[in-house]
Each structure stands twice: as C-alpha cells, then as structure tokens.
Image (tube, helix red, strand yellow):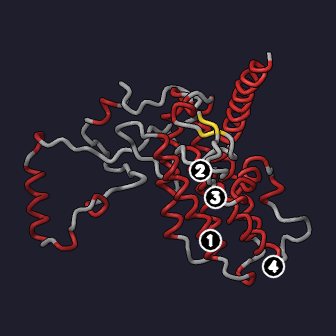
Amino acid sequence: MATAPYVNDSRPSTGKLGTSQSNIAFGHGGNSVSLPPPGTTHNPHTVYQHIQNTASKRISTLDYLRKAHEGRVYWFNTLLFSKNDLARMPFFDARKLARRATNYLILGLSLPSILDLNASGPLEYLRALNALLIEFESYQQIHSPDGPSSSSLSRARIPQMFKRATHGAGTKGRRTSSAADIGLPLSSCDPADVRSITSNVASAGSCVVNFPISEQELLPGEEYTHLLTPSLPFDPDFFEIFATLCDVLIDCYTRIIGLLPSPAMCAPNVGEMFAKADTRLRKVIVQGIVKDFEDASRSGAKSELTGVNKVVLGGLA
C-alpha cells in the first residue's frame, strides 16, 4: 500500500474529476441515482437526459474500479493498493474469491449474446438485459461465494469429466454444441468427408470416449434461458475476470447510449427498465467492493498520519 506522492507539485493522474464523483454515486447513491424524479417518468426528454447522464457515470465508475483493482490509480488520490493489499480485504477472501470469479465469468460470457441478439431497439435490449440479470441473481443465491468450497476440480466433479455421454432417447439437453461452435470449418468441407469421419468414429466402438459439453453443477430443475453456465476445468483468475467484466459492462452501457440517439426513442417503459437494470448491475459490481476499498483507505490514511505525527512530534520532544 502506497500513499500518493506529490512529485513536482503534481497529483497522480486519476482521470477526470467526475470519475471519483461518479464512483460515490455508483456505490452509495441508492435508488435516487437510478430512478428519474417523481412525476417525470413519461417525459421523454427527462428520461433521455437521465439515461445519458447515468450511463456515462457508470462507464467512468467501471473504468475507475478496474484501474483500482489493477493498481493503476490512487484511490481518491490517497492510497495505491497492490494485489497483496487487496488480498487483505474481507471482500478478497481467498476461500470465496474463486467462486466469485466463476460467477463473474458466467455473467461476462452471457452478456455478449444480449448485446448481439437484442440490439433492434432499446426496450427489447433492456428487457433481455433485465431477464439475464434476474437469472444471474437467482444463480448467485444458489451458488453463493459464501457457500461451500468452489473448487471446480473437486473429487465430486473429476469423475464426471471422463464419463461417456449416456443420453436416453427421450432426453433433450437444454443446450447443444456443434462442430461450428468449437471452430471446425465445416462450411468449407466436403459433406462426403464429414460422413466418412463420423462413420469411422462410430466404427471405433468402445475405444472412443465421448466428452460431452457439460454445464456448471446445477441443481435438479435449475435451468436458465439467458445465463450460460459452462463447466470450467479450473478456477479463473479473479483480477483478470473482473477487468474483463468491467469492459463488457462498459460495452453494455455504451450500447444503451447508442440505442437512444434522441428523446424520441424513449418509450414509456424505457426509463423503468433502465432503472431496474442499472440497480441490478450496481448491486452485482459494487456490493462489498467500494465499502472495503473505503475502509482500507481510511485505515491506511490513519496509519500514515500516525507515522507522520510520530516523526513530527518526535522531533519536538
């Protein structure tokens, strides 16, 4: 942990002043930031201005949080946190970090499909985004970082990775995977060659072990429409996943701004749907993170001031 030095009477660069201000609004603004003023919900100009301003603040905040996690910015021009400093915060408890990284990875993998397939209009996009975030909230409640160990290479899962796929005739998987999904250029292959390959594989009989595209360990009846839950062979790195998730969420807010070029595009339900999505995203990203950063920066600042007082007062004694 390092304090912000003043080299050549200059402060360390932390971006625009609005970045820090927006961070406060993101973390502690409550619903007052996300909801338009009372009585103006159906005013297209007010809704448009509110969405534009809020989305811009969220983009600045996400960029600020990403830089703070990477140790590239002094937290409100006070302390610079390294990864070792972050590891001592309650939010970054090693036992929970792998599960939290997996949850963030699942959300990051699911968001691009919303960005690509629901860009015809702002209302459709926000509805799909809300539906995804509702499913993610349900998933986090079931697979909470505060729950059991999240090691994806536990003894309970390793045997499942090497089992033959045994699907009944009447069983239908929720998601299927084709060769195109894993990058095989079937469009440029001769169909006869494809049939030859499949026939050779079938004739191999018991010598061939199938590796089905399995999903994250789900409870019976636990299914999701928008949320992708792939099974991971290892625990992802939290800091890489968090930085990438911030990038994807920045794209989400940028797409919202792009889908609303003028107040005329603000239908009556757009403001309400945006407020709901923004509240859920704020809960996903900020819950616990900003509080721990503030507590750690406050504690670190007190420690630094105590050291300075000892030096100053010691010289006067």
Q: Nearer the viewer, mark 2 or mark 4?
A: 4
Q: Secondary structure at mark 1?
A: helix
Alpha-carbon span between mark 4 and mark 1: 20 Å
Label 4–label 1 contact, CB within 8 A: no
Alpha-carbon span between mark 1 and mark 2: 17 Å
Residue 248, x across and y down, in percent: 52, 59
Sequence-wise, which precedes: disc 4 or disc 1?
Answer: 4
Q: Secondary structure at mark 4?
A: helix
Residue 106, x across and y down, in percent: 49, 48
- The amino acid type of the residue labelled 1 equals Glu
Alpha-carbon span between mark 2 and mark 3: 34 Å
Q: Residues within 10 Å of mark 3 (few under 14, many from 20)?
A: few
Q: Secondary structure at mark 3?
A: loop
Instruction: Tell me if residue 305 can be seen.
Output: yes
Q: Which residue, given by chain and number where applicable, does mark 3 sit on?
A: 15
Q: Residues within 10 Å of mark 2 (few under 14, many from 20)?
A: some
Q: Nearer the viewer, mark 4 or mark 1?
A: 4
Residue 160 marker: none
Label 1–label 2 contact, CB within 8 A: no
Q: Which residue, given by chain and number where applicable, does mark 4 sit on?
A: 45
Q: Determine the image quadrant of residue 81.
A: top right
Q: Which residue, given by chain and number where applicable, does mark 2 sit on?
A: 135
Sequence-wise, which precedes: disc 1 or disc 3?
Answer: 3
Instruction: Tell me if residue 137 can be seen.
Output: no
Q: Residue at x 26, y 36 (%)?
A: 163
Q: Secondary structure at mark 2?
A: helix
Q: Which residue, given by chain and number where applicable, does mark 1 sit on?
A: 124
